[in-house]
Amino acid sequence: MFAFDRHPEWNEEYKSAEYTSEVRTSEDKYRVGASAHITSKQEEIDVEITESLENEKISFSVRGVRGAQNIIGTFTLKPTEAGTEMTCVMDYELPWSILGKILDKLFVQRALEKDTERSLEKLKSILEK
């Protein structure tokens, strides 16, 4: 489900996602260097896997987000007695020095957390079917 071309199934912000790197096998979708172009409701972005540990962790860089830079997303999976615990972390920088930090605290973090929570709930419901 973490393959880029599957993201639109559970992330409402994404309209489509298409690999830009060569994909011959399903494993190729998770290899370091795998890349995709994603069309969202607001913009078009490019993503590339920067770290991949099977069934443990996948990190990716994101380019093309207006008003943000140095974006790294990470999904971490940890087995538990009840199933699997997943953690999602998005690291990013906003320009504009102190103004960017204020905007981040007031608006960006909240919106990102809300969107991420909604997407992860949808992903959870898909995986539990």
Image (cartoon, rainbow, N blue to C red):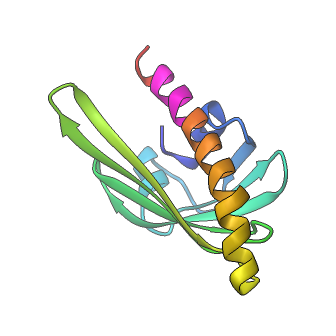
Q: Image point 44% across, 62% down: which residue?
A: 59
Eyeballing the image, is 102 above or below 107?
below
Q: Image point 56% across, 27% down: which residue?
A: 122
Q: Quadrant of residue 105?
A: bottom right
Q: Image point 66% across, 74% down: which residue?
A: 101
Q: Nearer the viewer, residue 91 or 53?
A: 91
Eyeballing the image, is 96 above or below 113?
below
Magenta span: chief secondary structure = helix
- Looking at the rendering, the stretch of residues picked out in magenta corresponds to 120-126
Q: Image point 30% across, 45% down: which residue?
A: 77
Q: Nearer the viewer, residue 28 or 79?
A: 79
Eyeballing the image, is 17 above or below 52?
above
The image quadrant where one finds the C terminus is: top left
Q: Residue furthest right?
A: 42
Q: How many marks?
A: 0
Q: Nearer the viewer, residue 79 or 115?
A: 115
The image shows residue 28 at horizontal and vertical percentages of 45, 55
State yes or no: residue 21 in magenta.
no
Q: Nearer the viewer, residue 126 or 90?
A: 90
84 to the left or right of 50:
left
44 to the left or right of 86:
right
The image shows residue 84 at horizontal and vertical percentages of 27, 34
The image shows residue 104 at horizontal and vertical percentages of 67, 66
The image shows residue 48 at horizontal and vertical percentages of 56, 66
Q: Residue furthest top?
A: 129
Q: Residue furthest bottom?
A: 97
43 to the left or right of 25:
right
State yes or no: residue 125 in magenta.
yes
